[in-house]
Image: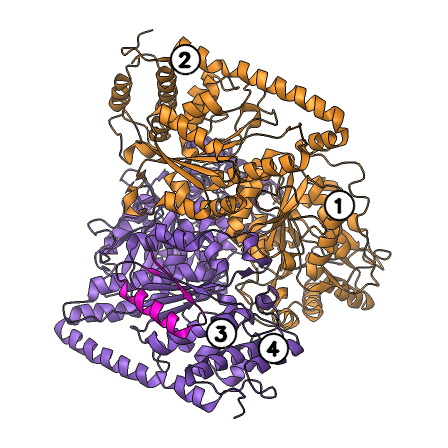
Chain colours: A orange, B purple
Amino acid sequence: MAIAKQLDIDELCVTTIRMLAVDCVQQARSGHPGAPLGLAPAAYVLWDRFLKHHPANPRWCDRDRFVLSAGHASALLYALLHLYGYDISLDDLRAFRQWGSPCAGHPEYDLARGIETTTGPLGQGFGNAVGFALAEAHLAAHFNRPGHAIVDHFTYCLCSDGDMMEGVASETASLAGHLGLGKLIALYDDNHISIEGRTELAFSEDVGGRFSAYGWHVQKADGHDRGAIAAAIEAARAATDRPSLVILATNIGYGSPVQDTAKAHGEPMSEADHLETKRFYGWPLDQPFFRPAEALAHMRRADQRGAAAEADWQRRFDAYQRWHPELAADFLRGMAHELPDGWDDDLPIFSPTEKPLATRVSAGAALNSFGARLSGYLIGGSADLAPSTKTLLDGQPGIRRHEYGGANLHFGVREHGMGTICNGLALHGGVRPYCSTFLVFSDYMRPSIRLAALMRAPVIYVFTHDSIGLGEDGPTHQPVEHLAALRAIPRLVVLRPADANEAAWAWHTALQHRAGPVALVLSRQNLPTLDRTRLAAAPNVARGAYVLAEAEGGAPKLLLLASGSEVILALQAREKLQADGVPTRVISMPSWELFEAQPRAYRDEVLPPRVSARIAIEAGVSLGWERYVGARGATITHDEFGASAPAAVAFEKFGFSVARLLSEAQRLLRQA
Amino acid sequence: MAIAKQLDIDELCVTTIRMLAVDCVQQARSGHPGAPLGLAPAAYVLWDRFLKHHPANPRWCDRDRFVLSAGHASALLYALLHLYGYDISLDDLRAFRQWGSPCAGHPEYDLARGIETTTGPLGQGFGNAVGFALAEAHLAAHFNRPGHAIVDHFTYCLCSDGDMMEGVASETASLAGHLGLGKLIALYDDNHISIEGRTELAFSEDVGGRFSAYGWHVQKADGHDRGAIAAAIEAARAATDRPSLVILATNIGYGSPVQDTAKAHGEPMSEADHLETKRFYGWPLDQPFFRPAEALAHMRRADQRGAAAEADWQRRFDAYQRWHPELAADFLRGMAHELPDGWDDDLPIFSPTEKPLATRVSAGAALNSFGARLSGYLIGGSADLAPSTKTLLDGQPGIRRHEYGGANLHFGVREHGMGTICNGLALHGGVRPYCSTFLVFSDYMRPSIRLAALMRAPVIYVFTHDSIGLGEDGPTHQPVEHLAALRAIPRLVVLRPADANEAAWAWHTALQHRAGPVALVLSRQNLPTLDRTRLAAAPNVARGAYVLAEAEGGAPKLLLLASGSEVILALQAREKLQADGVPTRVISMPSWELFEAQPRAYRDEVLPPRVSARIAIEAGVSLGWERYVGARGATITHDEFGASAPAAVAFEKFGFSVARLLSEAQRLLRQA
């Protein structure tokens, strides 16, 4: 090999990481070279001396979690994964940012290759890391027994100025400090450069002071000094009562002609600058993707250490399994996101003779029917609205500072933080997270919902107060566009049940759906419990839409489609229409996504193509309903904001009434 | 009057405020009594001794701005407005939270009645206040002249624990500290109670320490002690180089049987507790909405002080007008959100012979064409993406700490904070704000966009990198659902121009649209400039949709609808279809909302009802397009996430191609 400077093995490894990362960017002619150049020493020290992992088995459940919150530094992660022996080949690196490559522009959740979460949208990875650390703390408290520490790992997070500026990181840092998550260690790449220029343009706060105020252990270290970095990580690990922040003074684009400039951030270097960088590091100019054999051998030895660590853990787990077979089975089931036999044995059945119930209440009862059976696995909470969203697990303790074994999380008024923490909980495995707020505030956490959908993370959202039907709190709290906006997100299942039994089955469906997130959309106001002896059964919720009440006296002439609190209006209108001799079918349509996943034959059975007289009624915007009512159908919806008034008044004033349904029906039937 | 305890006039006024507020809640049987009881002394001290306002003229432009960020305490605000003589009657108070009442559940922007902004969703009011203070600082720097301080007011904000927990408040507090906004004073109602219980459940950070780290001036005061409150506000006003936080130790529900409990927060008291509260305060039990004459007279005297203050200001403004007539005219025009003659004289015209341009670039040129003419009025910036979003105003200085006269704002990586600050800027008047980020990150600021729409605040959003066409950055950065999700928001105009000239006219349209916010949605990738000598003119953008290329050889048999970067594909497909003898019309559809606002006749002219063969092509989800293509039409859209790959590859792989358009056309024409 032709390295001009003689480097010690650590320096050689760091340089190898740097050069592989910049070669990725250069080859793709796209990407972010600056952060890998600045962060490589810290990443190497962490991976070489501290990170507990087993590249041959990225799914080993007690591995340390590593989150690259600064997702734009993806080339750094791919270089590390390749050099440490994960399933990322040189050809994969060469295909950085190309169609089909595992080396995407920003890291995409791919556990088989050691990518723990999807990052890039700033602040999200940081919040995920809080979720990983919280999952670890919870599982350790729930499953570990004296002499059997089967859950015992750290969570490390590399983050950037951008992460530090995002509110979601503030929210989750505050909560992590509150909870005292001692095994969470964040390394902050304090390079003073953001896209518009030096961070002084917009960011002059004392980040360390802020984190101290959150209750974190805060250190500063020279990001070029491997010894200092190692000492800081050592001290951070020793501070077991609270999370740690290590502020690393680094230089973006270190060693390149664009060092310390915004140019280093988000674009490839010129060919000349690229070569000049190689020269600075004494690296061969004519061998892109060069990996010195000693460096590769040194880093690949991590696999032996990892194998030994996992084998040791497996021995300990085997012993645990002998001593605590039921706990061990629970643990393994949770890690696989599987449900135990009989988990739904107590699912409540609501009678139509009971007094009307809000679906938030019936859903809360359903949640509690399996809460105890899923103890340790099912955890969740609310952004300070649990008494309203009815999401407390009765009789189970809260999760508090240094008492993590409970089931009830208190997220505070931090919806976005809640969303991103739940992503981390779900991805960690072992726990199934749910979280709740009012539907209108789903907007606050939308970036996290999107990422859950993109990653297919099985988070359950409980969004209550789902329409103008919440009444007096007014338009700031009344969602109108949120159903449409959530339906727009690919891979997200939105479920809006119509009554107590649909609500119970909606929860049931959500827990069985592990291929992505589910949003349960629930009413604040009471709704009558439908008489299922006369109507179709509630488990049909799982099909997304179903014929709730069939037309009588002939084939349907009119289809009434509704979701949630408007279904009862459709049923009442049907009574009158049938009395007038109009065969009318009512379709309960709690979930478009589940319905779309049904076979064509089923969909055509529910919505017969030959019936064009269709009315959809839903207390929200019309957007998208044309798909189901067609060009000749009608929608009773509300394409404006709500108003502060009692719920019944708002419903009547905005036209959500049987009378309006009847007049629309007459109009359509006249046209037919 | 029958007040048992003899109270001094201040105490009497405070009690009057408290009792009116709880009577509102009690009458409505809905609302939040606790915060008004705890906060009334601070609110009274502020309004009585400091607030510069003129109840008879709530629009006086140099009034202090008062923001109740803790919007759930709305009854407190309505009580104040009523007692100080604003246009809120006793009957209005009695109709609290009822249909049509100005006293909505949460305060709704209503300047005629002294309500400066809509609050309730937590953290938003705090961010608005930063925007108000920034507007004041900017206008003062731009318009004031030695001896002529025509802009000189404070911004006060009352906020709660919930505000403090929200990330958006963290973002805006950090930026306010960075900018050293000395005339911003926040009073924090530190009552230790949130909805789920004591704040210790989830919130134990050192708020004062955090704000100190942001660079704020921080004080603590006893929220019951009017003297201490006054002294703290005095000191806060004296700290002119940085914003101030006054942490008020208060008791939620003070004086009621539910004091210091979560029960006091969000529900009316029982009748017994209500009476017990009245007893505690020595208030008549049988006279709801009781206002002692002395208290009313004392508070209503604010109007005389306000009249004198405004008259003094008017004299000073008249002098300013004589000395600086042009500046004065600019100032008044800006306060009225009007544009000067000739503002658009330099709007660029792009030639089809120039090389292809991204619409972000052409929009940036348009912005700069009127930037200089709107100096002082048009200000804006980006969440650290200006080099990518092309939103810098060339040759104009940045807005920096204690140098506020420039036009370019640097928001840092704080999208949500940017959105809420822009709401404050727009509501303050005198400035027209725009802000920019990538379209995918509109999710981060969605709660603020919603409030801008609800308030009809004329904020302009510049959202670039608008589809999978951004390429390699991958699905985390590729919006697919965002056009649909933005279109779902009532009152928001979404505009996605197809080429350079449409982009210029989109900016033109946005600046003329003062009835609410506008989102400009722009491409990262280059697009050919359409030849307007052969196609319809670009100013048609203002109509939302228009016939860009008419069918030839007969009435149209096929309609191709497209927006943005997909319009060129429709035009290219049309060429082939026309060559094959199919009369094909291409409709450029940059804005659904503007199109819906057109008369029916125009809409039917553009989309003739008799033509059912229609294809919409847009690089995003299909949601909603059925409205325009009908049951027999087709959509070429993408109901999944994107992928990391060069833009051209992503477009081809996901089916955004002329070939796909042609095959869909053939399918539809066969069916017809």
Q: Which residue is mark 2?
A: A295
What residue is shown at x 46% (from left), y 84% (from top)? B12
| Location of residue B282 in the rendering, given as x and y in whole percent from the top left corner | 55, 84
Same chain? Circles 1 and 2: yes
Quadrant where the image shows the N terminus of chain A: top left
Q: Are marks 1 and 3 on the same chain?
A: no
Residue A207 sits inside the magenta stretch: no
Label 1, label 2: how many angstroms apart (C-alpha)?
52 Å
Pointer 3 local density, CA inside 10 Å: few below 14, some 14–19, many at least 20: many
Location of residue A337 by image quarter: top right
In the image, which residues are magenta?
B216-244
Is there any visible trace of residue A105 in the rendered image? Answer: no
Tell me the chain of label 3.
B
In terms of depth relative to the viewer, which is nearer, B328 or A225?
Answer: A225
Image quadrant occupied by the C terminus of chain A: bottom right
Mark toward the start of the polypeptide (4 vs 3): 4
Q: Look at mark 3 in the image and give the residue it sits on.
A: B76
Q: Residues within 10 Å of mark 2 (few under 14, many from 20)?
A: many
Label 4 – label 3 distance at C-alpha = 13 Å
